[in-house]
Amino acid sequence: MRGFEFLRPGTLNEASALLATGDAAARPFAGGTGLMLMMKTGVFSPSRLVCLRQTEAEHRAITPTGDGGARIGALASLSQIEHDPLLCRLAPVIARTMTTLANVRVRNVARIGGTLAHGDPHMDMPPTLAALRASVVTSGTASRTVPVEALYAGYYETILQPGELISAVLLPDQTGWHSVYLKCTTRSADDWPALGVAVSVRMDGTTITDSRVIISAATEKLTRVAAAEAVLNGATAGLAAFTAAGEAARAVETIEDARGSAAYKTELVGVYVRRALQQATGAGGN
Amino acid sequence: MTEVRCDIAFTLNGAPVALNIGGHENIVDVLKRLGLSGARESCGQGLCGCCTVIIDGVAESGCLTLAQLVDGRSVQTIEGLDADGALSPVQQAFIDAGALQCGFCAPGFVLMSHQLLAANPDPSEAEIRDYLSGNLCRCATYPEIIKAVRLAASRMRAAQAA
Ligand SMILES: Cc1cc2nc3c(=O)[nH]c(=O)nc-3n(C[C@H](O)[C@H](O)[C@H](O)COP(=O)(O)OP(=O)(O)OC[C@H]3O[C@@H](n4cnc5c(N)ncnc54)[C@H](O)[C@@H]3O)c2cc1C
Ligand code: FES
Ligand code: FES
């Protein structure tokens, strides 16, 4: 992993300019935890790394938005997010998910922008944030707002263009919503999961008025399961609806790997979607 | 590929150091060159904590930290803990509780335990397990390590109250 330039521009716009060179081996560098692993194993040999940490003062704040949500700067570390009082109140599922995400040192260093841009389908934050209906705001060569569920093009692939940087994550108001993220690890507790399931359910009394069902790890990329949501929306919260949603979610295409066969993961999808819904709503037993 | 080199200057356990490094080197490589062997690279992947260093008060895996990123910052290693000749309360508790066998993992566990106790002076066993889940002990001294952290915590609280 020798012979790369390491540049430290002061703003995200300068960083974008340094990245929009047409060189696929030029990459932004945030926490560097994902990149360092890829560089050490020879999976990726950068020609140029453009460090974003100098822009931290401007881009790490976590602030309330006018409409009851929150804006998280892309350079906020995962530890900062885990302990942020506003986020803990707005979406406690985030801090709960953090406790089994890597370890304290990785969370101290990894940034939310790098976490979402990495594109590894086994990761915990992308499904959690997708279920919370979060979006990323980008700047640089393209400037747009993209729902987290639409950020991924494939395995380790995002729709971000060269020089397009994530500058913030927007979390909408969560009033009335209940969210849970579950991961199933089949080998050891700290291994990558065979399956991740994130669900969010909006309730009016015992009626489900809106929902999100997100599958990760078992699939090539994070996948929103509209068929399961269609079963839930308008239904009464309870075992029947949750079991039916789990059945509907089994339609996602799962991939075989060392953590289980595709058929096994499809079984897991049905069970874990039901369990996640039970836990999120407190209905239908557990 | 030609190596890119750079000059860095940082504070190491309270004293200023300056040196020329390879752009690809991590902080463990550089500490070794400076004669410090307490942070050691074992898994090299951020999993085991043997390479733990404290940078501007924050624990990081040295194996994943490019050395050039510590330019201008303050780095603490296990060697800084007893610089005044006295073991830190956590170091003493690790010895008293027998929380090391070969000792390879101990610098990382001790530094992480200091971080935990600074944030949470009276952690439960579950909190200790969670916080130290990114540290591996190949000799499996885990029960003694948890005892050591609790012992250090109670001694540190008693010292605080005195
Ligand atoms: C020991 C270990 C254990 C782990 N365990 C888990 C786990 O249990 N669960 C889990 O979910 N994850 C886990 N991870 C993965 C970890 O969460 C990621 O490595 C981390 O979140 C990446 O964030 P980063 O800031 O370090 O990204 P970097 O390594 O800096 O970057 C990652 C990617 O994003 C790009 N990038 C960075 N910032 C931006 C930006 N602002 N805009 C656009 N592109 C950007 C980079 O070019 C690169 O392609 C683990 C990692 C390690 C090392
Ligand atoms: S060597 Fe760095 S965490 Fe294991
Ligand atoms: S005491 Fe030997 S690795 Fe922990």
Image (tube, coloured by chain):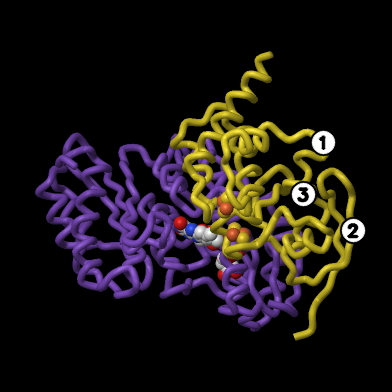
Chain colours: A purple, B yellow
Q: Secondary structure at mark 2?
A: strand
- Residue at mark 2: C-beta within 8 A of ligand 2: no
Q: Is mark 3 within 8 Å of ligand 2?
A: no
Going from N to C along the chain, the mark reached first, 3 or 2, is: 2
Contact between marks 1 and 2 (CB within 8 A): the answer is no
Mark 1 or mark 3: whose residue is earlier in sequence: 3
Q: Amino acid at mark 2?
A: Ala
Q: Residue at x 61, y 81 (%)?
A: A24
Where B152 sits versus A187, above or below? above
Mark 2 — on which chain does it sit? B
How busy is the neighbourhood of tag 2: few (under 14 within 10 Å), some, or many (20 plus)?
Answer: few
Cα distance, mark 1 to mark 3?
A: 19 Å
B108 w.r.t. A152: above or below: above
Q: CA distance from mark 1 to mark 2?
A: 25 Å
Q: Residues within 10 Å of mark 3 (few under 14, many from 20)?
A: many
Residue A131: x, y in percent?
Answer: 35, 53
Task: Please state if A232 lies on the left or on the right of B46 as rendered.
Answer: left
Residue lying at 34% horizontally and 55% vertically, measured from the top left: A183
Give residue B75's mark. 3
**Quarter of the rendered image showing ligand 2:** bottom right
Amino acid at the residue labelled 3: Val
Residue at mark 1: chain: B
Q: Residue lying furthest bottom in this view? A: B1
* Residue at which label 1 appears: B85
Spot the residue most to the top: B162
**In the displayed structure, would residue A188 be above or below residue A200?**
below
User: Residue B18, which numbered label?
Assistant: 2
